Image (spheres, rainbow, N blue to C red):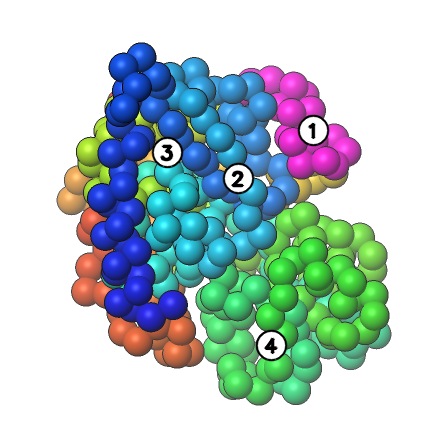
Amino acid sequence: MKKTQWVHAAAAALLATGSLLPGAGHAQSKPEVIIGYEDNGADPYMVSMAEHMFEQQMNADVQYKLFSSGPAAMSALASNSLTFMCGIGIPPLVTAIAQGLPMTIVYNQERYTDAAGIVVKPDSGIHDVAALQGKKIAIVAGSQASFELATFLAAAHVPYSSVTQINMAPPQMRTSWVTGAIDAAIVWDPVFSALRASGGKAIKTDGDLPREASSYNVCIANADWAKAHPDLVRGFVAALDQGYQLTLKQRDKALADMARQTGVTVPVAQSELAGYELFSGADQTTPKVMGMDAGAKTSATYLTLVNTAKVLNTIGRIPSVPASFESNVAPQYSRSFAH
């Protein structure tokens, strides 16, 4: 989508947000909130969904919409068919910001450690990142994977253009893996774990990335809408923290919820969850997540936005690095959780 189209879509979205105001057009009705999400495997926000915490904390009519990837979700946000989007990676967000969309992170859910990375076929002859040169790798173009692949290749001194990238959604990767259409994949759970379980070897995981240039799943909203509806955003954040707390204190119940929501077994959910460093509501205002006030600009989340933008600019996915991400990191909605 051209930049002007993104900006016009964003403007239309802002004009249309009145329908989400409590009672807009209906004297006694609850606000309507649509939460988008990806299948990132087991995750505490699945508990928030299963236990109806979003409905309770926001006192809203909540609907959920599943997306196959971050880039697809950004289009929905631009067209105002979503209020919040969770489970999205940093690169699609940075791309949208670079194209003029006023999106902001309202909650950083987790950092990938062992739940995403590069997995190769056992008979591919690939034993490290350097051996990817001349090979075919499956990737969701424009997703977190684009940043990760560029970062891993640069560290191994492998030209980005020397690896043949085949753009496909994670579910398609399973089929292509079996048919031999790809030598490797850079992907996240549940497909990352599934390919490893079928004999694939992980040569890199996201845990190899530094915290300030890392792989995060975040929840985002339109920044202008969030400012106009702070109570709804604070309720949304409270529901996410509530799901985290239940995961921490009632692990078995939480894992059962996650397994049910994602359609996997409890052991698989447990394995997927182990691949994340999870963040609570209180964590949001700390330097390792979004910081607070003046500290936001030196936080791991902010610096990851900057470093991701530099990589995306280098590989030609965005025309320039935004001058600032100050309006795109919003720890203030978690202030009440700060210790």
x and y percentages locating residue 5 in the rendered image: 30, 64
Q: Which mark is residue 260?
A: 1
Indicate the quadrant containing the N terminus: top left, top right, bottom left or bottom right.
bottom left
Residue 262 located within the stretch drawn in magenta: yes
Give the crowd class for mark 2: few <14, some 14-19, many >=20 residues within 10 Å. few
Dividing the picture into quadrants, the one containing residue 262 is top right
Mark 3 vs 1: CB contact within 8 A = no
For the residues labelled 2 and 4, the Cα–Cα distance comes to 28 Å
Give the crowd class for mark 3: few <14, some 14-19, many >=20 residues within 10 Å. many
Dividing the picture into quadrants, the one containing residue 60 is top left
For the residues labelled 4 and 3, the Cα–Cα distance comes to 36 Å
Observer-nearest of 122 and 144: 144
For the residues labelled 3 and 1, the Cα–Cα distance comes to 27 Å
Q: Secondary structure at mark 2?
A: strand
First in residue order: circle 3 vs circle 1: 1
Q: Secondary structure at mark 1?
A: helix
| Disc 4: which residue | 165
x and y percentages locating residue 282 in the rendered image: 35, 28
Of circles 3 and 2, which is in front?
Answer: 2
Q: Residue at x 74, y 36 (%)?
A: 264
Q: Which mark is residue 65?
A: 2
Q: Residue at x 59, y 45 (%)?
A: 40
Of circles 1 and 2, which is in front?
Answer: 2
Of circles 3 and 1, which is in front?
Answer: 1
User: Three-letter amino acid code at disc 4?
Assistant: Gln
First in residue order: circle 1 vs circle 2: 2
Observer-nearest of 220 and 7: 7
| Disc 3: which residue | 283
Total label count?
4
Looking at the rendering, the stretch of residues picked out in magenta corresponds to 245-267
